[in-house]
Image (cartoon, rainbow, N blue to C red):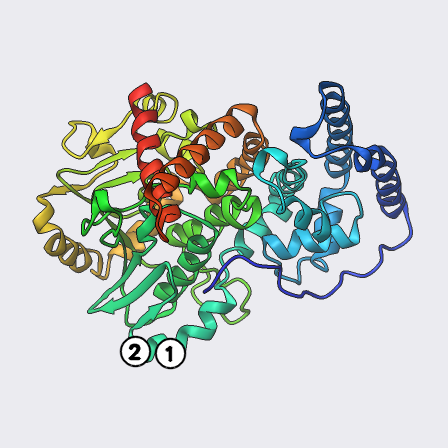
Amino acid sequence: MLTIGSPRPTPSPGPLPDGAFAEAAAALAADIREREAPLAGLPPRTGRSAEQQEQAARIHEACRSRRAGFLRAHAQDVYDHLTAGRTLRLGLAELVAAAAQAFPGLVPTTGQLAEELRHVQEDKEGREIDQGIFFREILRLPGAGGHLVDVLRDPTPEALALLDGFRSTGHVDLGKVRLERRDAGGHVTFHNESCLNAEDNELIAQLEVAVDLVLLDDGIKVGVLRGAPMTHPRYQGRRVFSAGINLSDLHHGRISFVGFLLQRELGYISKMLRGLSTRGRGDAYPAHGIEKPWAAAVDGFAIGGGTQLLLVMDKVIAAADSYLSLPAAQEGIVPGAANFRLSRSGARVARQIVLGGRKLWAGDPQSGLLIDEVVDPKAMDRAVEEAVEQLAAPAVLANRRMLHLSEEPVDAFRAYMAEFSLAQALRLYGDDVLDKVGKFSARSAAVANEAGHVQADAQAQAQAQAEVEVEVEAEA
């Protein structure tokens, strides 16, 4: 099963040339080493006394301020060194791993991140915040940040390895995501059935591969997203689009900041909007990349990350009994790039959905801000077929590209993602977030104990996920 793993091996950037930059990097390393030394003598986060908590907070605050100051002065030099003058196309995980080696103290090491994974979210030191500082300062630069945004539209090695087989069979099963070519459509189906298609590290990684294959396969003209029928008792046999982020995995510290929260926005969602990059190929023509239109079919509900996906679709079809919601503010996190994109649908409604957790039923008069077509649930299959036929028209690609240039210039997206990088990293360790996901996990465990069978944990998680989302919306 494809998952988010260790960064792929990349050429070492080598030592820094002598000069002021090298001296500043050495000073940073020495300063961080000295400041962080007392942390080794402290117990895990939740086992600390109030005095120890304050001590650790002061240490982290001082170190983060030091890192941010270094990057404000040298982020361009850091990126150019790591990418050999932008001749290397490093992904997020590869870039931050190379930074840990080349600039000690700047971002967490592989060992420090492995130690963090041993703990639930509330017991971590919060070293992913340092990654947030790093990516904020890189992405805020038009040169370095623009290069990185483009690099992250490269096809994944996994997709390239699967491409010939998919072209031959028209089908690939990645585990939690399946892709099938039917006529002109590339049908991507979420199959995290036991958890109501909640997003986790594995689903995110597999979805990016599926998106790449849709874009790379010449026989596919239109990509389609849809959820599979569920196995959870409450939704047995019914399709569900997405329940959003897996709250149980978030509590247990298994949601990757880089591999999940940044990668989904800068990776496959960006690819669905802008296509695959061709700038890494000198012979590429046309230079804008490999793009295709996308449609989404919403059955049941699209919660959180599910609704975020709809904001980059060219057509959204929803069953008449379905609804959309973005309860991220109630959960305590930032809903990806939804704040950036949803405001185009109307500032007041955007605030009601993002800040107030307003739920939009397909039949709501204002659902047209996010939904193009509402159909009887029994008519969804035919509506999807018609959407593929419509979007496969020759002039669609050129016109969607012009719309995107007007609606979302890539530089504006880059600037948003710079601020998102740090804001989301900080939110992951907010006391309110830790409290809410802890309560969710406790509820899930209680349901599992009551169920008392082999699959209880997954089913309990799905039941608790659904209950918590409904509760959050009711509170709003």
- The percent coordinates of residue 383 (x first, y second) are 12, 52
Q: Is residue 224 left or right of residue 444?
A: left
Taking depth in this image into account, of 378 and 337 the one nearest to the observer is: 378
Callout 2 amino acid: Thr
Return the x and y of residue 274 as percentages of the image width and height: 41, 52
Cα separation between marks 2 and 1: 6 Å
Q: Which residue is mark 2?
A: 169
How many marks do you count on the picture?
Answer: 2
* Image point (26%, 28%), residue name: 359
For label 1, the SS is helix
Q: Is residue 158 above or below residue 74?
A: below
Residue 382 is situated, as x and y percent measured from the top left of the image, at 10, 56
Residue 242 can be seen, yes or no: yes
The amino acid type of the residue labelled 1 equals: Gly
Q: Is residue 333 visible?
A: no
Pointers 2 and 1 in contact (CB under 8 A)? yes
Residue displayed at 25% across by 36% down: 370
- Pick the quarter of the image with the C terminus: top left
Residue wearing tag 1: 165
Tell me the SS state at disc 2.
helix
Where does residue 327 sit, x and y in percent of width and height? 37, 29
Q: Nearer the viewer, residue 433 or 401?
A: 433
Q: Is residue 326 above or below residue 255?
A: above
Can you tell which quarter of the image residue 381 is in? bottom left
Question: In this orientation, which residue lies closer to the viewer: 88 or 434?
Answer: 434
